[in-house]
Amino acid sequence: MVWLGHSSFFLQLGGRRILMDPVFSDYASPVFFINKAFPGSNAYTADDMPEIDVLAISHDHWDHLDYPTVMALKPKIKQIVCPLGVGEHFEAWQFDMSKVKLESLLLFDMMLFISG
């Protein structure tokens, strides 16, 4: 497991690459002067990431679901697991919805679901 800053984690679990709540932008906000990235937490970019087996999103706050990051990762993502309601963002962003698994789970349950 590698902590990527704030709520972002990269895990290799059971041979699967899991990326949790990635935010690689300088700001996790719709406006540039609010919620600036913590020092050192934006050291990684989407280009640094390998192919992602599972993108796990805990909820749709700006500091957990970052549009520029998700769009930059889009070609690398095989599957997305997110709570009910969050999938609407991926639909609006024209993701293949057959890759999106909507779960009404707690975060701990979501991690168990991801790990198989």
Image (cartoon, grey):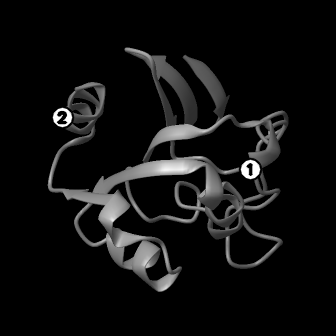
For the residue carrying disc 1, how many other residues have a C-alpha within 10 Å: few (<14), some (14-19), or many (20+)? Answer: many
* Residue 19 image position (x, y, % from top left): 53, 38
Left or right: 68 as drawn, with respect to 2: right
Q: Which residue is mark 1?
A: 24
Q: Which amino acid, by three-letter code, is at mark 2?
A: Asp
Q: Nearer the viewer, residue 28 or 35?
A: 28
Is disc 1 in contact with disc 2, using a CB cutoff of under 8 Å? Answer: no
Residue 88 in picture, x, y percent from top left: 35, 78
Find residue 59 and report its image quarter.
Answer: bottom left
Q: Quadrant of the N terminus?
A: top right
> Residue beneath label 2, please?
109
- At label 1, the amino acid type is Phe
Earlier in the chain: of badge 1 and badge 2, it is 1
Q: Secondary structure at mark 1?
A: loop
Query: Which residue is at a point 57% across and 65% down the rendered structure image?
Result: 62
Q: Say if 104 sits above or below 1 in the image.
A: below
Q: Is residue 41 visible?
A: yes
**Residue at image x 61%, y 60%?**
74
Secondary structure of the residue carrying tag 2 is helix
